[in-house]
Each structure stands twice: as structure tokens, then as C-alpha cells.
Image (cartoon, rainbow, N blue to C red):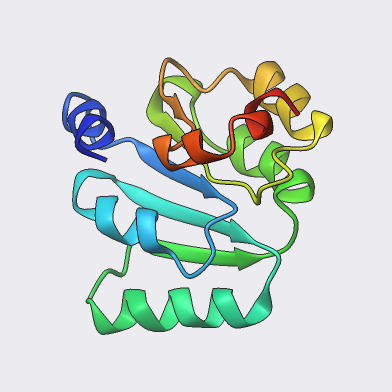
Amino acid sequence: MTQLRAVLASRARPALVDAYCGSGLFGLFLADLAGEVVGLETDGAAVRAARHNAERLGLPACRFVQGSAEGLLDECLAAREADGVCLLLDPPRAGCPPGSWRRIARRRPARSSTYPAIRRFWPGTRGR
């Protein structure tokens, strides 16, 4: 997380797109370094929790959208300049579906795409 904070701090307040955001843990923790945070999550209860957490923490630049990352990622990345986006991927253990990787490759969100190191415990997920 320290390295990700350093990357964000070195950029001019990029948009942070947090795919598979759950209740917003990473996005909320990094919100002070981002111009905006957009969290994508399928679980409605997790999205409600993320919104509640953002409101409770006084973070109006955080927005959480319910839906599949695969379905929302293209639109979310297209709406932002590639150089101004940091993409954070924290998918479930099954990993990112191939469609997500294709969308990411097409949009090329600069040099700042991150797959959290916590996934080192399930190394096979990166290859999926």
C-alpha cells in the first residue's frame, strides 16, 4: 500500500478507478491522493457500505457504482484521460476475467495499474 500511495502522490491527483472495490477499503484509504475515486462492485450490500463509509469519512469525491467491473470498466476508463487514471484491481480469488484484461489493454490507463500484493497468497489468480 505504501508503494501505491507513492505512485499516487507522484501524479497530479489522478482519478482512481477501484475495480472489485468491495466496501471501498483501498479507494477510501487512497482518496486523499486522488482527484476522484470511482469504485466498481457487483455486491449491492458492499456498495451501500462503501457509500456509507465515504459519507462518514467526509469524502465527497468518492463514488461507488453497483455492477460488474467487466461491464463498467470500459465506460469508466473511456470517460477519463488515460494519463490521469490509476487503476486498482482487487478481484476475487478467481482473478480478472479475460474480458477485463482486454478492456484495460484497449484503454491503457497510463503507467498506473495496480494489482494489490495481497494476492501473492493466491499466485494463480494473476494468470487467469
Image point (32%, 81%), residue name? 55
Give the farthest residue toward the front. 121
Residue 16 in which image quadrant: top left
Using the rendered image of the protein, determine whether residue 88 is visible from the camera's viewpoint: no
- List x then y, in percent, for residue 39: 51, 57
Q: Is residue 103 above or below residue 28?
A: above
Q: How many marks?
A: 0
- List x then y, in percent, for residue 36: 36, 51
- List x then y, in percent, for residue 110: 46, 17
Image point (43%, 38%), residue name? 116
- List x then y, in percent, for residue 60: 31, 69
Q: Is residue 17 above or below residue 68?
A: above
Q: Is residue 1 above or below residue 123?
A: below
Question: In what quadrant of the picture does the N terminus appear?
Answer: top left
Using the rendered image of the protein, determine whether residue 23 is visible from the camera's viewpoint: yes
Image point (54%, 82%), residue name? 48
**Image position of 20 (left or right of 52):** right
Q: Is residue 61 above or below residue 93?
A: below
- The residue nearer to you, when weighing 87 against 82, is 87
Residue 61 in which image quadrant: bottom left
**Image position of 8 (left or right of 39):** left
**Image position of 16 (left or right of 17):** left
Question: In what quadrant of the picture does the C terminus appear?
Answer: top right
- The residue nearer to you, when weighing 123 against 57, is 123
- The residue nearer to you, when weighing 125 against 78, is 125
- The residue nearer to you, when weighing 81 against 54, is 54
Image point (48%, 54%), residue name? 38
